[in-house]
Amino acid sequence: MSAVVSLRSNRRAQPAPARLALLGTGTVGSAFVARYARLAAQGVALPEIAWLCNSRTQVSGGDDLHAALEQARGAARKRGGFPPWAEGESPRPGDIIVDATASETVADWHPEWLTRGVHVVTANKLGTGGDLGRALAIGDARATGGRYGDSATVGAGLPLLRSLRALIDGGDRIHAIEGVLSGSLAWLFGRYDGSRPFSALVREARNAGYTEPDPRVDLSGEDVRRKLLILARAAGIALPAHEVEVASLVPAALAAVGEDAVDAALDALDAGLFARHAAARAAGERLCFVGRFEVGGRAQVGLRSLPADHPLCAGSGTDNRVAIHSDRYADHPLVIQGPGAGAEVTAAALLDDVLSIGSR
Ligand SMILES: NC(=O)C1=CN([C@@H]2O[C@H](COP(=O)(O)OP(=O)(O)OC[C@H]3O[C@@H](n4cnc5c(N)ncnc54)[C@H](OP(=O)(O)O)[C@@H]3O)[C@@H](O)[C@H]2O)C=CC1
Ligand SMILES: N[C@@H](CC=O)C(=O)O
């Protein structure tokens, strides 16, 4: 065989370099692009962003990512039909989809992509924190297919899922997990003193990028339910969503409105939360939004009035504070605390997962 032929066949044997598709160009997706560009400028080796997509359009990444992001963000609304990314070129095995949406449609694709050998990195909690069937399908598909980066889904990248998995890999059984799992609600109840309407603080939290696209997903406890489900399922418990008892903060008048009318209806929160805060203060306590599950017991999410020196009240800002009880941490739980919401920490968690997949 001549040297030329052998060189050509060697070239052919090289797998195509992995490409990255970003789905979602909102608060988290935009922070992802900004951090990607910063890391690339520092010389960090990253897969090329081949596409940026939202519900309206798909744009090629190219050399000027900021321009591509602006083009995607400025695209006109799309009426009906398939999402733009489903109509274009399919990702190849080894490519990485970054899901920075809050979309059920996109979450439904997670098991399919994994089965095809495409890696999925997600901030979207609906994949493993929603319907149990879908979570199990993702578990099956990741066992033989692509890898699943879910660090951003709980604690916005705090080492929670990682620590839980390390305990299980080390032979520990999980007994219970309890904690403050909502960054926006931690921030809201840390700040609320009754002097300003609660609804005004909700608007601030949304503008700061702490809430879900629809803040009712936080206020109803649904976001904490999803995180609790992700943790429970990571601990090997096939917990269905309906078995988590959730006490919502959303009054009927706010629950009833369409997404466009949420802002105007937020005032419906004010009287009820003023009364609950006043009662807690009169008892020398603080309000804390807590999620908890016990293996073989109940799973619950809701607002609690706790003594001010209770360990769950110890964080500040958007801090999550989560206690893991396991065989080795039976008497004193392992406690993990830190910022649990915000576009920058979430984007960093997504890129950590991208880098971790790229390095294996
Ligand atoms: N904010 C935080 O602190 C954290 C957020 N997360 C998660 O990050 C995700 C994104 O949140 P955030 O950035 O605030 O949300 P935004 O509403 O700002 O952005 C969502 C993006 O998803 C796009 N999108 C919606 N449906 C589809 C679809 N079918 N196909 C492609 N794109 C779609 C939207 O498109 P369009 O622009 O066309 O509407 C938009 O660009 C959520 O799942 C959230 O739970 C996770 C951890 C922390
Ligand atoms: N809306 C979420 C964001 C992170 O998951 C929260 O408030 O914790």
Image (cartoon, grey):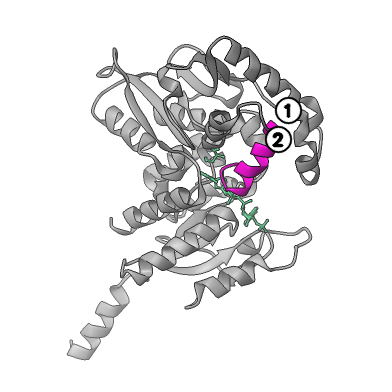
User: Which mark, residue 270?
Assistant: 1
Q: Position of residue 253 (x, y in %)?
A: 81, 29
Do the residues bearing badges 2 and 1 touch, measured as CB atoms within 8 Å? yes
Mark 1 C-beta closer than 8 Å to ligand 2? no
Which of the image's four quarters has the C terminus?
Answer: bottom left
- From where the camera sits, is residue 188 visible? yes
User: Which mark, residue 199?
Assistant: 2
Give the quarter the ligand 2 occupies: top right
Q: Position of residue 34 (x, y in %)?
A: 47, 63
**Side of 16 where 301 appears, left or right:** right
Q: Residues within 10 Å of mark 2 (few under 14, many from 20)?
A: some
Identify the residue at image location x=49%, y=48%: 122
- From where the camera sits, is residue 61 visible? no
Q: Position of residue 225 (x, y in %)?
A: 56, 28
Mark 1 lies on a secondary structure that is helix
Name the residue at the front extreme.
195
Identify the residue at image location x=49%, y=34%: 136
Front-most of residues 78 and 349: 349
Front-most of residues 279 and 119: 279
- Residue 354: which quarter of the image? bottom left
Mark 2 and mark 1: Cα distance apart in space: 6 Å
Magenta segment range? Answer: 197-212
- Residue 131: which quarter of the image? top right
Residue 205 is inside the magenta segment:
yes
246 up-or-down from 227: above or below: above
* Labels in figure, total: 2
Q: Mark 1 belongs to which amino acid?
A: Asp
Mark 2 lies on a secondary structure that is helix
Q: Mark 2 belongs to which amino acid?
A: Ser
Q: Earlier in the sequence, mark 2 or mark 1?
A: 2
Which of the image's four quarters has the N terminus?
Answer: bottom left
